[in-house]
């Protein structure tokens, strides 16, 4: 349904996580009997969670631990891990920077050239621990870094930009041929980010194995404020999932939808799956882990941009171990820990045995769902992360 916003302009209403609720099922299932396995191309994931390719979240040690717990942590090949052999001092400088100077300091740190030998080394370090290695690069460097990643033994390669399309016009450089990239690398390629049916469908036609959905919803991303672009995550996921289903019906090839960003609590994660996601990617939630290299600080991927930063450094604190955040047991009551437990419990409550069944669960528009009857929680700080 479209609404008139003035003269001959129409605008479609779109929805985010706080505006919808999941309807309980007519039957229920014991959470331990639910199956949360998902796939990205031929690769099976016991835990349908990915950690964002952000420097404050993923380094080699984090990627290894995350893999051991059943998920995928994406290493940023455009970040500090491939610019510096030793990164401890780098993280200390970012952590201790004054708020007024943080962006400038980060911009200076990221001027150090990326080193091919460090790309190889980091991926090989992850592979030595017998977990899957996943890495990402911006579109301009995707083919170059992708070839190195394959050589190093990467299992999945991610092409990630603020906005990715199959048609990019430029007088300054030759756009990456996404079809050629998928064909040449011969490992599953995930592409993003996008938020619309048409772009998702066109990206699927390149041969990729997964699509990242989300423009600007991350806690440390300022794209929506700086550029004014984005679509709330529930609507974006629903639209892209519809493209996935159409493409699968037409071709017989299934391309996974990965909702990327905007989720902090288990409730947000569950709503993403009900909206149609096959997996979710989170940054802020995992930046709070003891194992995260940012040590309580988190910053946007576009923060180092020389001319127009679209990210900021935020303090998220350290609330527990990665295992507690992902698998529990939770020691907080705000829904930010035991995300897998929340997913399984939700599936049991709606009678969904698998992720595919969860995707068919009813959503309702309910903008008061988080505040209804919660006056005492607000006044006492319960569930507010205090």
Image (tube, rainbow, N blue to C red):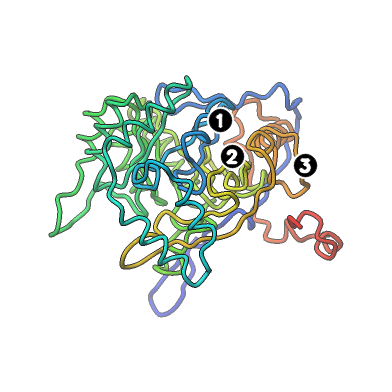
Q: Secondary structure at mark 2?
A: loop
x and y percent of residue 167 in the render? 22, 50
Q: Earlier in the sequence, mark 3 or mark 1?
A: 1
What crowding class fits label 2: few (fewer than 14 Cα within 10 Å), some (14-19), or many (20 or more)?
A: many
Which mark is on residue 331? 3
What crowding class fits label 3: few (fewer than 14 Cα within 10 Å), some (14-19), or many (20 or more)?
A: some
- Along the line of sight, the residue nearer the viewer: 254 or 10: 254
Residue under the image location 53 percent in, 68 percent down? 98
Write down the residue under mark 2. Answer: 291
Residue under the image location 52 percent in, 45 percent down? 57
Write down the residue under mark 1. Answer: 65
Q: Quarter-wise, where is residue 84 in the image?
A: top left
Q: From this view, report whether residue 172 is shown above or below residue 198.
A: below
Quadrant in which the C terminus is drawn? bottom right
x and y percent of residue 73 in the render? 49, 35
Q: Secondary structure at mark 3?
A: loop
User: Which of the two marks, 3 or 1, is nearer to us in this view?
Assistant: 1
- Mark 2–mark 3 CB contact (< 8 Å): no
Mark 3–mark 1 distance (CA, rounded to whole Å): 20 Å
x and y percent of residue 176 in the render? 20, 44
- Along the line of sight, the residue nearer the viewer: 130 or 377: 130
**Left or right, 5 with reference to 358:** left
Mark 2–mark 3 distance (CA, rounded to whole Å): 17 Å
x and y percent of residue 174 in the render? 14, 50
- Mark 3–mark 1 CB contact (< 8 Å): no
Q: Quarter-wise, where is residue 374 in the image?
A: bottom right
- Mark 1–mark 2 CB contact (< 8 Å): yes
Residue under the image location 44 percent in, 34 percent down? 256
**Left or right, 207 with reference to 175:** right
**Left or right, 254 with reference to 171:** right
Q: Quarter-wise, where is residue 121 in the image?
A: top left
């Amino acid at each position: 349904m479209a609404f008139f916003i003035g003269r001959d302009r129409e605008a479609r209403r779109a929805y985010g996580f706080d505006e919808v609720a999941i309807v309980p099922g007519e039957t229920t299932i014991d959470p331990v009997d639910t199956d949360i396995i998902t796939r990205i191309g031929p690769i099976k994931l016991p835990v349908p969670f990915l950690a964002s390719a952000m420097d404050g979240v993923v380094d080699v040690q984090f990627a290894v631990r995350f893999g051991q717990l059943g998920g995928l942590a994406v290493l940023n090949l455009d970040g500090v891990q491939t610019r510096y052999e030793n990164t401890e001092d780098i993280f200390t400088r970012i952590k201790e920077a004054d708020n007024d100077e943080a962006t400038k300091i980060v911009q200076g740190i990221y001027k150090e050239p990326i080193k091919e030998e460090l790309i190889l080394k980091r991926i090989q370090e992850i592979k030595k621990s017998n977990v899957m290695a996943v890495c990402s690069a911006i579109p301009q460097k995707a083919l170059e870094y992708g070839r190195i990643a394959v050589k190093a033994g990467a299992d999945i390669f991610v092409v990630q930009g603020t906005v990715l399309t199959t048609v990019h016009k430029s007088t300054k450089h030759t756009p990456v041929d996404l079809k050629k990239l998928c064909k040449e690398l011969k490992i599953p390629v995930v592409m993003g980010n996008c938020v619309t049916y048409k772009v998702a469908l066109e990206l699927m036609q390149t041969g990729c194995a997964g699509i990242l959905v989300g423009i600007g919803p991350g806690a440390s991303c300022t794209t929506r404020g700086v550029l004014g672009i984005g679509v709330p995550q529930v609507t974006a996921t629903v639209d892209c999932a519809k493209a996935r289903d159409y493409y699968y019906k037409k071709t017989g090839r299934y391309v996974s939808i990965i909702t990327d960003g905007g989720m902090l609590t288990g409730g947000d994660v569950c709503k993403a799956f009900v909206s149609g996601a096959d997996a979710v990617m989170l940054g802020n939630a995992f930046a709070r882990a003891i194992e995260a290299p940012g040590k309580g600080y988190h910053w946007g991927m576009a923060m180092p941009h020389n001319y127009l930063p679209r990210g900021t450094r935020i303090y998220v604190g350290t609330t527990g171990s990665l295992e507690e955040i992902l698998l529990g047991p939770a020691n907080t009551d705000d829904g930010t820990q035991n995300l897998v437990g929340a997913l399984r419990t939700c599936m049991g409550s709606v009678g969904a045995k698998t992720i595919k069944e969860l995707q068919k669960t009813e959503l309702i528009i309910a903008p008061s769902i988080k505040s209804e009857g919660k006056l005492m929680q607000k006044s006492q700080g319960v569930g507010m992360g205090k």
